[in-house]
Amino acid sequence: MKSAEKMCLMPGCELRGEIFAKEDGWVGGRFFGTMVVSGRLVLSRSAEVQGILVAGSMDVELGARVQGMCFIGPQGITEWKRYRETRSSE
């Protein structure tokens, strides 16, 4: 596996709950808050997520439950930072 494919948590994460993860980006469990990762994020079919997800790319397996906002793609982190600044100035 190339290092660019590995999932890496980044500053800005504020998570609570149970999280199961593998370095290839696979994530399962029940958690809420903000998850910011560089690279690819794969939500397993057993995942239950409430909050904000920020990732370079994301796959969601059939059965996963996601409630909240997602900022995905090359501009995902930039857009999420802009969103945070807007929310903090309100």
Image: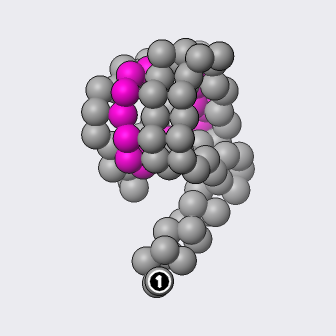
Q: Which residues are magenta?
A: 28-42
On the rendered structure, is 88 left or right of 76? left
x then y, percent, for residue 86 = 54, 77
Q: Residue at x 70, y 56 (%)?
A: 75
- Residue drawn at the location 53% of the way across and 18% of the way down: 44
- Residue pointed to by mark 1: 90
Does the segment drawn in magenta span residue 31? yes
Percent of width and height locating residue 43: 55, 24
Regarding residue 62, the answer to whether it shows in the image is: yes
Residue drawn at 37 percent across, 27 percent down: 30
Which of the pair 41/87 is nearer the observer? 87
On the image, which quarter does residue 9 sit in? top left
The answer to whether 38 appears left or right of 75 in the picture is left
Q: Quadrant of the N terminus?
A: top right
Q: Is residue 29 above or below residue 49?
A: above
Location of residue 23 in the rendering, given as x and y in whole percent from the top left corner: 46, 22
Above or below, comparing residue 4 to residue 89 in the picture? above
